Amino acid sequence: MPEAVPQAQPSSPPPAPVKKGPRGEVTIYATWCKGCRICVEFCPPKVLAMDPGEDHPRVVLPEKCTACHFCDTHCPDLAIVVRKLA
Amino acid sequence: MSDQQHILDAAALHAEEALIPQSDWFERNETLQKLRKNKKFPTIWCSGCGIGVVMGALIRAIDHLGLKNDDVALVAGIGCTARMPVYMDFNTLHTTHGRALAFATGLKIARPDMKVIAIMGDGDALAIGGNHFIHAARRNLGITALVVNNAIYGMTGGQYSPTTPLGGRATTAPYGNIEPPFPICELAITAGATYVARSTVYHALELDKFLAEAIAKDGFSVVEAVSYCHTTYGRLNKLGTAADMMRALKDDSISKTAYDALTPEQKAANTKIVRGKFVDIDRPQYTASYANLVTRVQTGDK
Amino acid sequence: MTIKLMQGNEAIGWGAIAAGCRFYAGYPITPSTEVAEILSRELPKVGGKFIQMEDEIASMAAIIGASVGGLKSMTATSGPGFSLMQENIGYAAMTEIPCVVVDVQRLGPSTGQPTAASQGDVMQARWGTHGDHPIIALSPVSVRQSFDLTVRAFDFSEKYRTPVILLTDEIVGHMREPVELPDFETIRLPEYRLTQPGQEYIAFRNEPGDVPQMASFGIGYRYHITGLFHDQVGFPTQRLDEIDPWLERVNTKLEKHLDDIRLLEEDDQPGAKVAILSYGASARTGRHALKLARAAGKKVDMLTLLTVWPFPEAQVEALGDKVERIIVPEMNLGQLAYEVERVVGRRKVRRVTRANGEMVTPQMVLDALEG
């Protein structure tokens, strides 16, 4: 069996894996929020969380926001705003 | 940013108790420029109430159309839905129960150049206001009727309305409602409305689109926004939380396209809410017809 | 204008046009229908707008909406329709939106006798809508006065930001008299509303002055009008420190301007110990009886109320101080007499009533004058 031809070594480091950053920035206006949980329950990547007893949600996975705008178009109190990031 | 940094705290937000400050809140969201800066927020509605979602859709639609605030008038009846106009920075008229369209008729005739939007609940528009609804449609007045259908009389505590589903419980239907509900859109079409559409608060962006089209329309346009009340109807019929009921609006509705593709038997058996645009036609609009009449009279050509 | 034989209702229509009315919404009802018919014909000629609404409730709502939109507006009806309008009359009274409501009174209650006359809506004009509220009601005695008081009604409604009721009746409404109307160019009511944007505007301010200046919708002031109790800005409130001053201002604004609002005609005879007090069609009866009584040598005073509401307490009290008896003929069972009795005492008042569609006769008044 012939020997495997050794592969040439790359001369530059391999490209770094692409880091998918957040596509949207979420802001919650706590004093307008009435804690209905619609944003928490419907956010597809589960960016938001709200424990029982809390009166407004928290952004727990900000990097996962895709700026789908479900939360800010479905918030009954206009208490959450998503700003699309460049 | 830590999650805490996303939450603006009350003290930073408000100069005075609960008044909207000139903060970055408005700068960041063009649409919210349409809210009244001197009005106390949060809104009066229950936590999770779809009326707030409809209000968001309405201001996005008005913003999208590029209308000047001075050119828009909101005329409301009485009820939870009718509490909407006070929050928005337009010419707002909060009238008597069922009579929004009649007040709106006078206002539109006096100012045909303004965009007049009547904001009503299902009881306001179809029960006490039913007569005015059908005549406004018949006349094809250039008014947009936004009817939020929450299937109940919410403000007064949960009595049944002309759109409460058959069998549904309400405080005045403790054994279940025995009256078949009005199909709002079909009624509007038959009465002569030239733009009729229905959607739900789950489908908020579709509501934006229908509202923008309805407001731009020169004719009597009806948008029914379905948002069953979770506080009264939902609780009496054990339908869960606001989020649960919003999920149900998604699951229990069907697009008009899909509905049209059903067989007659399937259509007859359908219990899902049909969402879509049902009518978009052109007929002479009332104030334009009257203007023609005035011209005829004044030029002696009777 | 030349002298024309004109119907009372027609004169009301012309009065509206002369006053600048440019919107009418109404529902036909005998004996008011001529007002609608005339305005449906004349309003388009002057660039005004007419619509026949589906009922009286809608008619009242539409004229309020049109007034908010900047047009002087009017409706006309009779008893049953007037009853339907009450809720929205209260709305206009408390939201302080100017408008004119013509009530050509007919015999009731209920369907009654549509083609017969009465003065049965006097109390309804004051208290028909629920709750405490101010109102102005004017009653013409003649065809010419139907024109004049309609013009005054529009002026009062704009000046005091209130609905004004033209409380006429089937007799004065349907009769024909020769009248010479003034040239409409000579009738130019002042403009009380804001017409230019740009000022800081508090829609329902309580200070200074009793009547905040009105801004029609769409001219540059965006504000909220509601039937709920509201603050000076117009937003609903439940705070007593906002409600109390507002209620005080609205409920006393007319009282504070009685000299302007209280229209009446006094015909005194020195030494008279008896007086006739009347209004509308019954004042015609009163005047006829007055003529006959004086011709027979009797000294009699007469007070004709052109403004029925607010009731002219001071004048009636002064009359009660002067005479021993006040005869009140009216085509109802004594609705205005209640007010006279309240002010001068029951013993001084003699009611002469008729509520069956027939006019009180001069003889009935003469009999009352005799005691």
Image (spheres, rainbow, N blue to C red):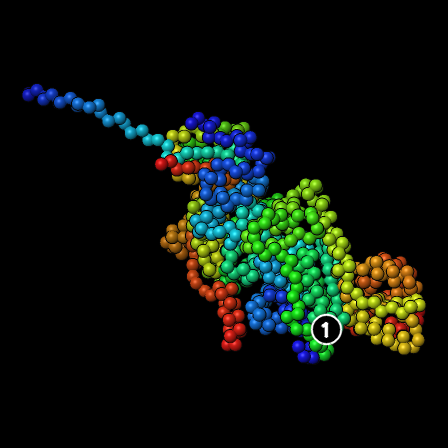
> Who is closer to the viewer here, B117 or B201?
B117
Residue C129 locus on image (x, y percent): 71, 56
- Report the residue marked by disc 1: C144
Q: Position of residue C310 (x, y in %)?
A: 77, 58
Furthest-left residue in view? A2
The one of C191 and C252 positioned closer to us in this rendering:
C191
Q: Nearer the viewer, residue C336 or B200?
A: C336
Q: Residue at position x 36%, y 36% from top?
A: A86
Quadrant position of residue C240: top right
* Secondary element type, mark 1: helix
Image location of residue C110, percent across then percent down: 72, 65
- Residue B151 appears in the picture as rendered: no
- Which residue is rendered at x = 87% and y = 60% of the image? C318
Question: Does residue B113 show up?
Answer: yes
- Residue at left 22%, top 25%? A14
Q: Decide which of B124, C156 is in the foreground and name it.
A: C156
Residue B159 horizontal side relative to residue C140, left or right: left
Residue at position x 66%, y 54% in the image? C96
> Amino acid type of disc 1?
Arg
Q: In which chain is the residue bearing label 1?
A: C
Q: In the figure, C342 relative to A81: above or below?
A: below
Q: Position of residue A41 (x, y in %)?
A: 45, 35
**Number of other residues with Cα within 10 Å of mark 1, as a class: few under 14, some 14 to 19, many 20 or more:** many
Is C181 situated left or right of B47 in this image?
Answer: right
